[in-house]
Image (cartoon, rainbow, N blue to C red):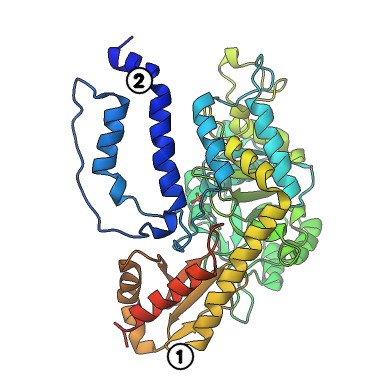
Amino acid sequence: MNLLLEKDLTNFEELLQKVAEQGTAYFKNIDTEKTSLPVVNNMNKSLDNEGIGGLNTLKLFNKKFKDTIVASSGPRYLGYVVGGTTPAAVIGDWLTTIYDQNPQTTTAQGDVSVQIEQETIKLLLDLFHLPNNFLGGFVSGATMSNFTCLAVARQWVGKQEGKDFSKNGISSTIHVLSAVPHSSAIKSLSMLGMGSSNVTQIKIEEGNRESIDVNDLEQKIKALNNQPFILISSAGTVNSADFDNFEAISKLHKKFNFWWHIDGAFGAFAACSPKYKHLVKDWENADSITIDCHKWLNVPYDSAVFFVKEKHNLLQLETFQNSNAPYLGDPSKNFNYLNFLPENSRRLRALPAWFSLVAYGKDGYKDIVENSVKMAQTLEQFIIQNKELTLLTPTRLNNVCFSLSDKDKQGKTHIFITELNKEGKVYMTPTVYKNTKGIRASFVNWRTNEKDISIIISEIKRALKTIY
Ligand SMILES: *Cc1c(COP(=O)(O)O)cnc(C)c1O
């Protein structure tokens, strides 16, 4: 054994302790850490022949990188949709690394990791009040979850015409309908060879909405003349967290032949609260659902799940079959995740989610969701009362979307955001909502509290001074 490896093995406890101390300090004081920092570039492009061992590497990391890490998992990082990590999720994640399992098949002797993943899927279905007629698995993020669901949808479309697209390639146009799909669903269409520009745009509902106009959807369905198609619908659009009308879509789904996909990357968590679960009423009738775990579930990157109806299991196996490796077994006999999703080898992503779900239960997630929404509503109230700012959409759930009030100041939106983020106390991202330049704040972090909102509001007031 290499001497440095041998030494690190001997000193492993000390190494872990050092990281535990450093991690504790960061985790406890994250709300004083900066949410933005000047960009540094101190990249080393060559690797020495001789290593320096674990402890010195930790020292070097701390010297070189530690102070330039932004608190994106802290309570005032409101850009994009970025969650934090619960304490239980962190310990689950550490153990994922320590045990270093590769969840594949339940039949491998003594491998319990698949069981952990499947149990976690059941716990999640229960958390979201979804029925057990969905199967699911973990992938790296909602992009890959959309990809997975749409890949099975693609195979389904082929089947309707007696074709096997997975085996023989796509040999006809696949019709896709959507209103305000997430960019990653479009990216998935491109990766799947369905074409990112082959989306038929459904009208959106009137009245400052981003949801599907169901009448227009029905007309577009009729115009397809019974050709199979894929509907991509939203449980939470990124700007206004708007939801499609799943009750109405359910009725159409009974009447017409299509694959119904829901992207609920963060909006799915509405189901965790009795106050907001009406937003996803009847969503269980969908064929597939995408949900991110590294957002509102507050587990570390990279983690998301897909749910696909069990009745489509054969299509899913046809899509992801890894069958030309005899030592991996017969896919029709043994359940194996490598025949069920894009990746072959992967880490036990389910474990951090399992830890956090078990540690905090349904009530814990109800509290997290309701708190995030309350924080969003508090910020919304401030914006409504401030003349220099205008709400671009009502705050339906956890995302607050607003702009500078004066039309002739809106060109300075990026200056406002740069100023707002400069002190590193809050972080928001720019957006464009119905052709207006705006600012967006997304609340999904379990830690955010009233004190944070006061800091956020005083930072907004400070940044406004550079504009007005
Ligand atoms: C974040 C998000 C995605 C993409 O998720 P990643 O985890 O970044 O891959 C997809 N859809 C919606 C609605 C999202 O909010």
- Real-space CA distance between mark 2 and mark 1, rounded to the nearest whole angstrom: 60 Å
* Secondary structure state at the residue bearing disc 2: helix
Is residue 107 shown above or below 217? above
Q: Quadrant of the N terminus?
A: top left
- Give the class, few, some or many, for how many residues have Cα within 10 Å of label 1's Cα (few <14, many ≥20): few
Q: Residue 367, how many percent across, how many down? A: 67, 59
Q: Residue 407, how many percent across, how many down? A: 39, 88
The earlier-in-sequence mark between 2 and 1 is 2
Q: Is there a contact, CB below 8 Å, between mark 2 and mark 1?
A: no
The label number, if any, that marks residue 8 in the structure image: 2
- Relative depth, front residue between 320 and 397: 397
Is residue 170 shown above or below 81? above
Q: Quadrant of the C terminus?
A: bottom left
- Relative depth, front residue between 438 and 119: 119
How many numbered discs sit on the rendered protein? 2
Q: Amino acid at mark 1?
A: Lys
- Relative depth, front residue between 270 and 167: 270
Label 1 C-beta lies within 8 Å of the nearest ligand 1 atom: no
- Is residue 135 at all visible to an observer of this figure? no
* Secondary structure state at the residue bearing disc 1: loop
- Give the class, few, some or many, for how many residues have Cα within 10 Å of label 2's Cα (few <14, many ≥20): some
Query: Along the horizontal axis of the image, is 58 left or right of 367?
Result: left
Q: Residue 194, how many percent across, how many down? A: 53, 48
Residue at image position (56%, 31%) is: 348
In the image, which is nearer the foreground, mark 2 or mark 1?
2
Residue 408: quadrant of the picture: bottom left
**Residue marked by disc 1:** 387
Q: Amino acid at mark 2?
A: Asp
Residue at image position (29%, 58%) is: 37
Is residue 458 shown above or below 252? below
- Is residue 256 at all visible to an observer of this figure? yes
